[in-house]
Structures are given as structure tokens and as C-alpha cells.
């Protein structure tokens, strides 16, 4: 059940011309942050990605096709981006394993000291 996915942080329409179809006001910039989920924990990482998509011609514009104007607008939006802080949250099964490990450790110490 190890899965990683990206969730949307910010979407913005930008007024630059599309490098493919040259239409105005059809570019949508999306910033996403990575979320990892396993059986034991959920974690938000520092990894972010941005995608540029033209809504008119339905094409994803890759960074190699960006013009200088588009790069400046993307940099502007990156500076104002508020990412979620890096975090890890344990699921109930992980907490159960931690508690079980602590109990086993206490029992071992008590047997070693001769109390039990």
C-alpha cells in the first residue's frame, strides 16, 4: 500500500500567450506537493512540482517550451507559494506497534532485574 501522490497547493491563470496555440488567458499554472502514504504513516514532503497547461488546446507545456515571460511569472508565483510544512503522522497500527515494543522492553528489563 505504499503510495505517493501530489495534492494541489495553488492554481493560477496567467495572462501569457500559449507557446503552442498562441491564445491569451488560457494558461493555468498548478503547484503540487508530494504526500506519501503507507500502512504505518502519512508524510508530507518538501518536494513540489509545477505544471503549466493550456486550457484552449489542452496541452501540457513543459519547461523547455516556456518563454522568458512565462518563466518570470512562474518565479513570481513560486515566491508567493505557501507550502505545507514537512510532517509525519503515525497511523493507529504504528502506535500499537510502538506501545507493544515499549511493553516488551519493560518486561525484559523487569526479568533482567529479577523483579518478575
Image (tube, helix red, strand yellow):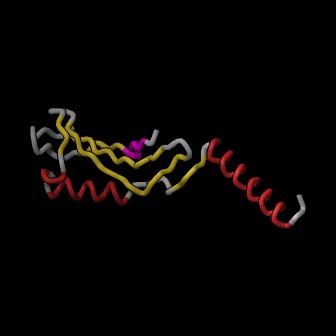
The question of residue 5 being in magenta is answered with yes
Q: Is residue 2 left or right of residue 75?
A: right
Q: Position of residue 45 (x, y in %)?
A: 45, 54
Magenta segment, prevailing SS (helix, strand or loop): strand
For the point 48% across and 51% down, the residue is 44
For the point 24% across and 45% down, the residue is 52
The stretch in magenta equals 3-10
Q: Which quarter of the picture shows residue 11? A: top left
Q: Could you say which quadrant of the image residue 73 lies in?
A: bottom left
Q: Is the C terminus in the top left, top right, bottom left or bottom right quadrant?
A: bottom right
Asked whether residue 55 is drawn in magenta, I would say no
Residue 97 spot, x, y in % from top left: 66, 48
| Vertical order, 51 against 104 (above or below) | above
| Residue 12 coordinates in the image, percent (x, y) | 32, 44
Percent across and percent down for residue 65 are 12, 50
Looking at the image, residue 11 sits to the left or right of residue 96; the answer is left
Image mark count: 0
Q: Nearer the viewer, residue 112 or 44?
A: 112
Q: Which residue is outermost to the right?
A: 115
**Residue drawn at 18 percent across, 44 percent down:** 61
112 vs 101, nearest the viewer: 112
Residue 105 relative to residue 80: left or right: right
Is 76 drawn above or below residue 60 in the view shown?
below
For the point 39% across and 55% down, the residue is 81
Residue 56, image quadrant: top left
The answer to which of 25 and 47 lies nearer the viewer is 47
Q: Determine whether 74 is above or below 2 in the image.
A: below
Amino acid at each position: 500500500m505504499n503510495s505517493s501522490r501530489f495534492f494541489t497547493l495553488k492554481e493560477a491563470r496567467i495572462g501569457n500567450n500559449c507557446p503552442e496555440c498562441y491564445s491569451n488567458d488560457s494558461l493555468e499554472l498548478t503547484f503540487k506537493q508530494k504526500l506519501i502514504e503507507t500502512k504505518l504513516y502519512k508524510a508530507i514532503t518538501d518536494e513540489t512540482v509545477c505544471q503549466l497547461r493550456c486550457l484552449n488546446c489542452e496541452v501540457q507545456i513543459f519547461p523547455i517550451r516556456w518563454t522568458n515571460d512565462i518563466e518570470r511569472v512562474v518565479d513570481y508565483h513560486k515566491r508567493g507559494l505557501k507550502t505545507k510544512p514537512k510532517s509525519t503522522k503515525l497511523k493507529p497500527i504504528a502506535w500499537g506497534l510502538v506501545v507493544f515494543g515499549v511493553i516488551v522492553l519493560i518486561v525484559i528489563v523487569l526479568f533482567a532485574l529479577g523483579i518478575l
